[in-house]
C-alpha cells in the first residue's frame, strides 16, 4: 500500500497489519520524553528524528481536533522545536487536509517495506566465529570472503553508539547524552551489527526482535566505503541471525526518495507496504 488518497479505503486486514506495524515501530524506537493526551502521544527527543519528535494517534479523540492541535503546538513551542504530526494510512484524510490548511508542510516521507524471511535473497557467509556466549547465541564474527567481516552483539554498547554517532554525524552534546538512554529503553531483544576497518566503525545496523518480526534500523555506511557491499552484508547478517532466533518476517523504514537504499532492499526481497509522512510547522528542523 502506498500513500493513501482522499476517500481511499483501507481493508480490515490491511488495517490490522498497519496497526501491528505501528506498534512495533513504537516499541523499537522510544522517545526521550512522551506525553499521552486524549488518544494521542506527544513524543520529544531534542529533534533527533521526526519519528521521536512528533504526535502520533493511537486512540479515539474526545476533545475537538482544533483544540488538540493548538495544545500540541504550545507544548512543542515551549520545548523549542517544530510541531510535527505523523500521518499514516489509518488516519482520516480530512486530518491531513486540516493540517495543510493551517500551513503544515509535508516533511520526511517514509516507505515501510516488509519481507517474508523464507523468500529473502541474502549474502552467503563464508564462515562464523563464536568468541563468547550471549543471550541469543549469536556468532561474534560473520565473514564474507577475506575482506569483509560483520561483528555482532546482543546489546547496544557505548562503543557501538559512539561509532553510530560518527557515521550519522551526531555531534550535539545534548543528543550524545540522551540518545543512549533512548536505545537503552528499547524493551525488545536487539542484535547490534558493525563493520570495522583499523578499529573504526564504517558500517552499522540494528535488528530489533518483536514477536515473529525483526525490524532493521540504523543502517549507515561511511561515504568512504560506499559500493563495497557493506550495507548488504550487515542487513543479510541481521536477517539471518534474527531468523535463527525465531523471526519469520522483517520490516524496515526508508526515506521514500532514497532510491539507492530502496533498490538494495528490494533486491534482498523487501516490498513496499505503506507510506507515511510528517506534517510540520514551526521552529527548528529534524533529520
Image (cartoon, rainbow, N blue to C red):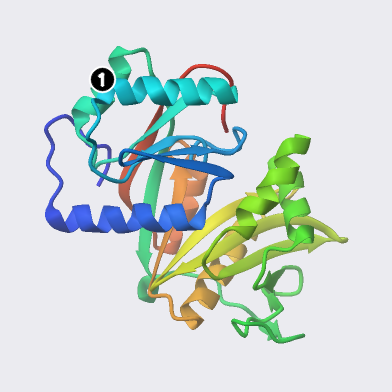
Residue 136 horizontal side relative to residue 15, left or right: right
On screen, residue 126 versus residue 246, left or right, reads: right
**In the figure, residue 23 lies in which quadrant?**
bottom left
Eyeballing the image, is 183 above or below 104? below
Q: Residues within 10 Å of mark 1 (few under 14, many from 20)?
A: few
Q: Position of residue 257 (x, y in %)?
A: 45, 35
User: Looking at the picture, how far across and down is residue 112, in whole percent?
Assistant: 38, 49
Residue at (57% x, 33% y) in the render? 287
Judge left or right: residue 92 versus residue 201.
left
The residue identified by callout 1 is 98
Callout 1 secondary element: helix
Residue 91 occupies quadrant: top left
Q: Nearer the viewer, residue 240 or 52?
A: 52
Direction right: furthest residue: 198
Report if residue 252 is visible in the image: no
- The residue at 50%/74% (across/down) is 242
**Could you say which is closer to the camera, residue 93 or residue 139?**
93
Instruction: Check the image and report above or below for 215 versus 286.
Output: below
Residue drawn at (55%, 42%) of the image: 33
Tell me what residue is drawn at x 59 percent, y 22 percent: 80
Residue 79, image x, y percentages: 58, 26
x, y percent for residue 218: 59, 53
Q: Would you place residue 101 above or below residue 200 in this image? A: above
Amino acid at each position: 500500500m502506498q500513500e493513501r488518497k482522499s476517500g481511499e479505503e483501507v481493508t480490515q486486514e490491511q488495517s490490522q497489519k498497519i496497526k501491528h506495524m505501528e506498534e512495533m515501530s513504537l516499541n523499537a524506537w522510544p522517545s526521550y520524553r512522551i506525553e499521552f493526551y486524549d488518544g494521542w502521544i506527544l513524543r520529544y527527543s531534542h529533534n533527533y528524528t521526526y519519528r521521536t519528535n512528533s504526535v502520533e494517534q493511537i486512540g479515539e479523540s474526545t476533545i475537538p481536533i482544533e483544540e488538540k492541535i493548538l495544545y500540541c503546538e504550545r507544548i512543542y513551542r515551549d520545548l523549542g522545536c517544530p510541531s510535527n504530526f505523523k500521518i499514516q494510512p489509518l488516519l482520516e484524510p480530512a486530518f491531513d487536509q486540516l493540517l495543510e490548511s493551517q500551513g503544515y508542510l509535508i516533511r520526511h516521507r517514509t516507505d515501510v517495506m516488509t519481507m517474508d524471511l523464507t523468500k529473502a535473497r541474502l549474502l552467503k557467509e563464508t564462515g562464523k566465529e563464536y568468541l563468547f556466549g550471549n543471550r541469543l547465541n549469536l556468532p561474534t564474527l560473520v565473514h564474507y570472503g577475506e575482506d569483509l567481516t560483520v561483528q555482532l552483539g546482543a546489546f547496544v554498547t557505548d562503543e557501538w553508539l559512539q561509532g553510530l554517532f560518527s557515521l550519522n554525524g551526531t555531534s550535539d552534546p545534548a543528543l550524545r547524552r540522551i540518545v543512549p538512554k533512548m536505545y537503552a529503553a528499547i524493551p525488545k531483544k536487539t542484535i547490534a551489527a558493525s563493520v570495522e576497518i583499523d578499529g573504526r566503525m564504517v558500517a552499522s545496523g540494528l535488528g530489533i526482535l518483536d514477536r515473529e518480526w525483526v525490524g532493521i534500523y540504523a543502517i549507515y555506511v561511511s561515504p568512504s566505503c560506499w559500493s563495497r557491499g557493506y550495507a548488504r552484508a550487515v542487513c543479510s547478517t541481521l536477517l539471518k541471525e534474527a531468523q535463527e532466533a525465531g523471526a519469520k518476517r522483517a520490516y524496515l523504514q526508508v526515506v521514500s526518495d532514497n532510491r539507492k537504499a530502496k533498490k538494495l532492499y528490494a533486491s534482498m526481497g523487501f516490498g513496499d507496504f505503506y507510506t507515511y509522512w510528517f506534517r510540520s510547522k514551526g521552529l527548528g528542523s529534524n533529520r
